[in-house]
Amino acid sequence: MTTEDMSQYPLRLEGDNIPMVRFANVRKSYGALTVLDHLNLDIDMGEMVTIIGPSGSGKTTVLRMLMTLETINGGVIYVDGEPLTHMEKNGVLVPANPAHIRRIRSKIGMCFQHFNLFPHMTALQNCMEGPVQVLGMSKKEAEERSLELLDMVGMADKANQYPSRLSGGQQQRVAIARALAMRPKVMLFDEVTSALDPEVIGEVTNVIRKLVDAHSLTMLMVTHQMGFARDISDRVCFFHSGVIAEQGSPAELFGNPQNERTKQFLNAVLESN
Amino acid sequence: MEWRWSWVWELLPQFIDATGKTLLAAGGGYLIAVVLGLVLTLAQRTPWRPVTVVVRELVEFIRSTPLLLQVFFVFYVGPQFGINLSPWTSGLIAIGVHYAAYLSEVYRGGIENVPKGQWEAATAINMSTVQTYRRLIIPQALPPAIAGMGNYLVGIFKDTPMLSVIGVAELMHTANSVGALSYRYLEPYTMVGVLFLAISLPTAFFIARFEKWVRRKMGM
């Protein structure tokens, strides 16, 4: 981590309208390659923000940093008003220790492109694992809650199947139920339909639509499904070369893009469809 | 020189008794190896570099020197440092530590085979490192490691004759004593071979069955 004046960052966000997630000057690089350059992005409580952009633009890295799967090289990420990547020590922010990261991270859930279900556990056991092991919930309570969630994603009848017996779309729905079982405040969807056959994409996007309608979840999604992004998002961010080149409501961004890069990208995507 | 069946029957009870001791030595040594091997593997995966380097070198050292030397070392050199162990204890420690080094490599392969996505999913449901190993990584690393673990179970069993050199009264030791008393080696050594075969072959067979069963049980 480069030396940075940490006093510019508040120890916690205060006020009436604090964002659920704030990226403040966040930088990420791999060696000489800068992946994200001074990212500043606020996501409000209950907001659905979609990130689009060409591959290599750093969009997945945004989610992975928020899930603490990647460390950051500068700046601070706040979740629910508290710093995630840092913690207070003697009145200034210092890099967070694992215990602090775990405490704040409990507010975040994530679904992956390749589902990453636990292959040695049934769908139900996948959903119960976190609540029982991490939250210390009783098995009975965790089972009830997991079955409810599996029902919500339309997978109750497959609760006792192992992932290897499920289709991609079914696995992804179980993965969504598994993430929700941890009662996150923020849900991250990382290209959750990219590995799916076209005919089953709908079953996963429908579940996400349901979440948007029914829950007060804050959601951050990376997707290549432009139609879906347009339908469902409150805000769309177009990433290019590690910065947000343009952002706005779906109507603005898809209907009347201002940035040349955005126009090029949208044209290219529309042509390929 | 003709084969004497009557003598074979006469020796059989003694040899069966010695087979029990061989199995005990192999089983005890294997138990040490299974547990210690896992410790050696996990120690090499800690974030503390001095620990990983020392353990890595230790494993290499154990794997690169003969078991017989290690057996002698524990039994004969130990007392010069005030560590007096019985032949049985020395034998079990030597063979257990030796095979722990091999098993740690088997475990390492199994653990490295678990996809990175599993670690990420564990982070996403906020599991600790210990929970991740215990609930996700080791259970998934185990089925592919069973074949290798089984090979070393048969291996440790076949290496128990090494303990005869420090006086552990296992099968080989018994055959040697009988031969030395009677000047006849054909029957005792043949019996040792047959008894080893009678245990090794079914063991290998059951390990293969067990591996299939575990994979099915775990939905893999």
Image: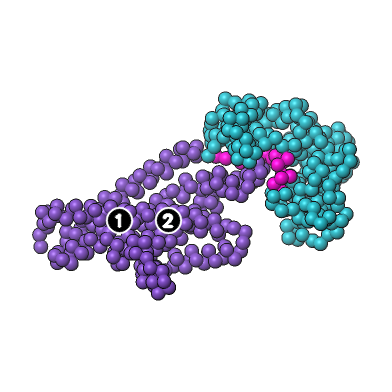
Chain colours: A cyan, B purple
The residue drawn where x is 38% and y is 42% is B209
**Bounds of the magenta span?**
A101-119
> What subunit carries mark 2?
B
Under mark 2, the amino acid is Ile
Residue annotated with mark 2: B32
Q: Nearer the viewer, residue A121 or A260?
A: A121
User: Quadrant location of the C terminus of chain A?
Assistant: top right
Please tell me in which quadrant of the rendered image residue A220 appears. top right
Q: Nearer the viewer, residue A139 or B103?
A: A139
Q: Nearer the viewer, residue A215 or A56?
A: A215
Q: CA distance from mark 2 to mark 1?
A: 15 Å
Mark 2: give few (<14), some (14-19) or many (20+) Cα within 10 Å: many
- Dots 2 and 1: beta carbons under 8 Å? no
Residue A104 magenta-highlighted: yes
The residue drawn where x is 80% and y is 33% is A46
Q: Mark 2 or mark 1: name the one nearer the start of the chain.
A: 1
The residue drawn where x is 58% and y is 30% is A140
Question: Is residue A26 depicted above or below A153 in this figure?
Answer: below
Under mark 1, the amino acid is Thr
Residue A39 located left or right of residue B108 = right
Mark 1: give few (<14), some (14-19) or many (20+) Cα within 10 Å: many
Please tell me in which quadrant of the rendered image residue A137 appears. top right
Question: Is residue A132 depicted above or below A103 in this figure?
Answer: above
Decide if residue B207 is in sight here: yes
Please tell me in which quadrant of the rendered image residue B91 appears. bottom left
The residue drawn where x is 23% and y is 57% is B192
User: Quadrant location of the N terminus of chain A?
Assistant: bottom right
Helix, strand or loop at label 1? It is helix
Residue annotated with mark 1: B22
